Image (tube, helix red, strand yellow):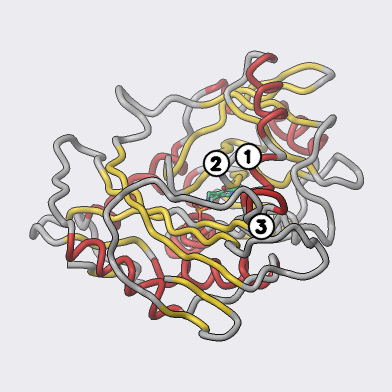
Amino acid sequence: VRWSAEQGWHDAGLRPYEPVTLDPATSVLHYGQAIFEGLKAYRQPDGSISAFRPEANAARFRDSARRLAMPELPDELFLGSLHELIAADGRWVPTRTGDTLYLRPFMISTSVGLGVNAPADEYLYSLIASPAGSYFTGGVKPVSVWLSTEYVRAAPGGTGAAKCAGNYAASFLAQAQAVQEGCDQVVWLDAVERRWVEEMGGMNLFFVYGSGADARVVTPELSGSLLPGITRSSLLRLAADFGHEVEERRISTEEWEKDAASGELTEVFACGTAAVITPVGRVKHAGGEFLVNGGNPGELTMKLREELIGIQEGTRPDPHGWMHPLS
Ligand code: PMP
C-alpha cells in the first residue's frame, strides 16, 4: 500500500516477492524514516492459521508512525494485509514443533529529495512473511546478559518506545560488546543515570520475587524509552490470572544484584515475539558478575512460558481472545 499527500492510502495489492528499486536520493536511505512490526501466526490444531494479538501490533505500528512523523496506517489495512497474504499464500505447513510463520509489516518513506526539514510526503507500507523455527532447539537454555553502561539505546524524549529502524542501528555495537564480554545479550539501562533497567536486546524483562503461590512479578515501567512489548502486556495479564501480584516499576541494577545474592529475587526472564520467554541465568557488568537462581530456569518462568505457548498453539483455552483467525 502506498501513501501520498494527494491520494492518501492507495494502490493496495499483492506483488511477487522481489527486490525493491529505490532512487539513491530516496528519503529513507538518508533520514531513516522506517518502522516495522514483528508478529507470529500459528497453525491451530484444526488446521487453520491464527495470529497472536495482531490488533496490538496494528496499534503499536500507528504509535511508531506518529513518533516518526509518518502517516498512520488504518488498522483495517494492517489486518487486511495479514489476511490477504495468508489467503494468497497459505501453503506454509509447520513440520516441527514450535514452527511458526513470522510476519514482518514495515513502512518506509519513499519521497525522492535530500531536503531534511520536513517529513517525506510519500510512503510505502509492505508485509513480508517467513517460516521460523523454534527459538530453542533441545530445551530452554538460560541466557547471559551484559549490562551496558557505555552505550544507551534510547533517551528521554527519543524514539525508544517506537519500533523504528534507528533504534536497532543504535544497538548493534552494544550487542557486539556483550558478545565480546562472553554474554548472549545486551541489557539496556536508562540514558540519564545508567542505573534503571529498561530492556534486553529485542525483549522486555521480568523479575520474580519469592516463590510458589506467593511469587510477585515485577517488570520495568514504560519509561518512554523502552518498547511496550505485546508479550510483556500478555504476561502481566497471565501472571495476574494465576493470582500473582504484578507491578510495573523502576528496578535498579544495584537492586537486581543485591536481591539475586540474597535469594529474594528468585527468577529473571526476558520475553518477546521471537523467543516468547527466555530465562536469564547470568548477569555481567563492568564491576563483576552474578547468577540468578543459580543460573537455572525458574518455576514461574516455565509455567508462564507453557501457558502462553499453549494459547498461541491452540492447545490451551484463550480466555482473553488473543488469537485472531487469518484463515
Ligand atoms: N523490546 C524490543 C527492543 C523489541 O525489539 C521487541 C520485539 N518486538 C520487544 C521488546 C518485545 O516486544 P514484543 O513482545 O511485542 O515482541
Residue occupied by mark 2: 270
Given the image, on which type of amino acid does mark 2 rest?
Answer: Ala
C-beta proximity under 8 Å, tags 2 and 1:
yes
Given the image, on which type of amino acid does mark 3 rest?
Answer: Ser
Q: CA distance from mark 2 to mark 1?
A: 7 Å
Give the structural element (helix, strand or loop) at label 1.
strand
Residue occupied by mark 3: 27
**In the image, is residue 77 above or below residue 182?**
below
Closest to the camera, between mark 3 and mark 1, is 3
Closest to the camera, between mark 3 and mark 2, is 3
> In screen coordinates, is 154 left or right of 179?
right
Q: Quadrant of the C terminus?
A: bottom left
Q: Earlier in the sequence, mark 2 or mark 1?
A: 1
Give the structural element (helix, strand or loop) at label 2.
strand
Q: Residue at x 64, y 42 (%)?
A: 168
Q: Which mark is residue 49?
A: none
Furthest residue toward left: 46
Residue occupied by mark 1: 200
Q: CA distance from mark 3 to mark 2?
A: 35 Å
> In screen coordinates, is 127 left or right of 212?
left
Q: Residue at x 37, y 33 (%)?
A: 135
**Closer to us: 169 or 298:** 169
Give the structural element (helix, strand or loop) at label 3.
helix
